Image (spheres, rainbow, N blue to C red):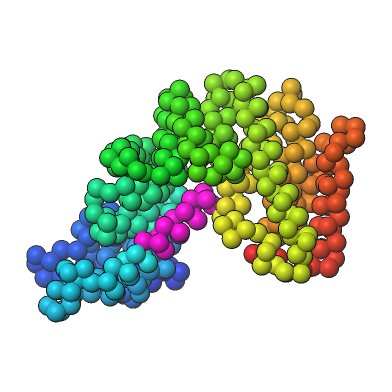
Amino acid sequence: METEPQVSGTTSKIIPLALPKGSEKLCELCQRGARLQCAKCQVTFYCDAEHQQADWVGIHERICQLLIPIRTPSTPTLLSLQRAGNIEVQLKKAELIEICRLVAQSKLWEGKHREALPAAQFCLRCSIDVLGSSTVQLVPAYLLLAEANMGLGNLAPVAELLSQAEWAVLKSPECGHAVHHRLHRSLGRLHTATGNLEAALLNFANDIYFASEEYGPDSTVTCGGYFLMADVFAKQGKMAIARSLYSKVANTWHCHLTNLLKTHVENVQNPDVLLEPSYDKAQRVEVDEMLRTMLEFEQKDSRGGSVQIVLVAHCLAMLWFLGGDSLKALGFGSTALQACQLIPNHDLTEPIQGLLQLVQSLQTDPRPGSD
């Protein structure tokens, strides 16, 4: 006889199912037959404790109680209202979709692809339930799930998901630039992963075009396409082109972070304005990885001058100062200053020294951070 599964205290309790014949439940993650039930909401089911724990960490902890009114068997009167398009139920489902989208995106920015998978899966399933199976509004959910799988190396489902997203976009001529940009970026990443570098470059070029139309040519969103394109050229051994594109990315981020730092200095008594609302901790992790890649590229290449090292290291110092990590800010600031000292009369010497002084002063007189 099977004993009740023991799950870590960081998750909800689960109980074995004792269902009558013909009422099989499906696992929330894999859609196979379930034998366990979440003890808190009692409307979510799993094939084993491992999938329950993965779902809890990924999304279920956030939405457990929200699922009860949606999944609880309805009375005939309520069922008729739901079939007629009950507004309250639809609003609850829309709330779930948005929560799952935000959680999945945040985890993807942090590089936690396995944890992002349950949120992305639920986001797509719930979106199809609310919007139908053939609307361009599903594309963001397709792309989230594709990115989560891509990060785990599951390229077969990625190709299928992107194919469905591409078909939805092709059927919708009125589709906006932002959707096109995200689709082409995902396609470019898939082709990069499969080694089809020419196709990757073509998609990244389209990504840059549509992002420029939506956000502007000097946007940090747009420069993400340049970064990915530079990575492809580096794989092809075209280092001069890669360096040129990395330089554009570095200059864009340097301008952006300099403006954020200026805002911080001007409003040092008001921590609420240290960072833009859309620029959170998870995004800093993604930006940090991108800037570190460019810094390592310059440091490894003997032909690379110190100018780019100064620029990128200064970016990283500002990024982590604004993120409230003074140790990282000091480390990257010192790297920037050392490289700067090799270039006579470099125009960033004073700003870098000023940043280091600011970090050191806050270590002795700390103020509330941005996190």
Q: Which residues are magenta?
A: 97-112
Residue 360 lies, in percent from the top left, at 84, 58
367 left or right of 241?
right
110, 53: nearer the viewer: 110
Determine the residue located farthest toward the right in the rendered image.
344
Q: Looking at the image, which is closer to me, 131 or 335?
A: 131
Q: Is residue 212 left or right of residue 120?
A: right
State the predominant SS element of the stretch in magenta: helix
Look at the image and say whether residue 134 sits in the magenta stretch.
Answer: no
Quarter of the image where one finds residue 188: top left
Tell me if residue 212 comes above or below residue 237 in the rendering.
below
- Image quarter (top left, top right, bottom left or bottom right) of the N terminus: bottom left
9 is higher (above) or lower (below) than 129? below
Choose between 14 and 56: the one closer to the eye: 56
Q: Residue at x 85, y 51 (%)?
A: 354
Residue 35 location (% of width, % of height) = 23, 64
Image quarter (top left, top right, bottom left or bottom right) of the C terminus: bottom right
Closest to the observer, 203 or 59: 203
Tell me if 149 is positioned left or right of 87 in this view. right
Q: Is residue 201 left or right of residue 171?
A: right
Residue 103: in magenta span: yes
Q: Position of residue 285 (x, y in %)?
A: 59, 51
At horizontal 79% and vertical 51% (from top left) the residue drawn is: 330
Q: Residue 364 sits in which quadrant? A: bottom right
Question: Where does residue 45 sit, x and y in percent of width and height?
Answer: 27, 65
Residue 245 visible in the displayed image? yes
